[in-house]
């Protein structure tokens, strides 16, 4: 069986000889293809999405970067709120109230 693409979770790296083609914003996964094909597939997908949305690829990139900037701002605000409320990040899975594993 020949693998024609690899779906990568956040923070994982593509296999050797494979490159990132695009990132699916709905699932958070990245699609990796063999290195010469990843550039071509990414370009074709970018053109297809811009045609589907009825805007130029440059406008599509501007919208994506604007969205990414907003997401960074939300993350900064979330961290500030956590600091103000003195919330510590969760360490491991939470247990239900009243459950005792001992």
Image: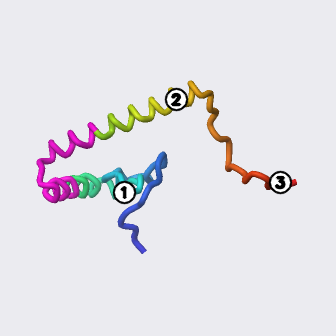
Name the main secondary structure of what is drawn in magenta: helix
Q: Residue beneath label 2, please? A: 81
Mark in front: 1 vs 3: 3
The structure's colour scheme is: rainbow
Quadrant of the rendered image containing residue 44: bottom left
Q: Which residue is drawn at 27% across and 54% down?
A: 36
Q: What is the spatial separation of the Cα atoms under label 1 and label 3, in whole angstroms? A: 42 Å
> How many numbered badges does the structure rendering display?
3
Quadrant of the rendered image containing residue 59: top left
The 10 Å Cα crowd at callout 2, few under 14, some 14 to 19, many 20 or more, is few
User: What span is in magenta?
Assistant: 44-66
Residue 9: percent from left, percent from top: 47, 53
Q: 35 left or right of 55? A: right
Q: What element carries label 3?
A: loop
- Comparing 81 with 69, the one in front is 81
Which mark, residue 80?
none
Residue 10 is one of the magenta-drawn residues? no
In which quadrant is the N terminus drawn?
A: bottom left
Residue 67: percent from left, percent from top: 30, 40
Up-down relation of residue 56 to residue 75 (above or below) = below
- Comparing 18 with 99, the one in front is 99
Q: Residue beneath label 3, please? A: 100
Q: What is the spatial separation of the Cα atoms under label 2 and label 3, in whole angstroms? A: 31 Å
């Amino acid at each position: 069986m020949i693998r024609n693409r690899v779906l990568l979770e956040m923070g994982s790296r593509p296999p050797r000889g494979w490159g990132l083609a695009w990132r699916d914003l709905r699932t958070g996964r990245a699609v990796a293809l063999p290195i010469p094909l990843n550039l071509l597939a990414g370009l074709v997908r970018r053109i297809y999405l811009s045609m589907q949305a009825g805007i130029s690829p440059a406008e599509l990139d501007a919208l994506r970067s604007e969205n990414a900037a907003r997401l960074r701002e939300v993350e900064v605000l979330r961290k500030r709120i956590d600091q103000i409320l003195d919330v510590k990040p969760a360490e491991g899975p939470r247990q239900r109230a009243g459950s005792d594993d001992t």
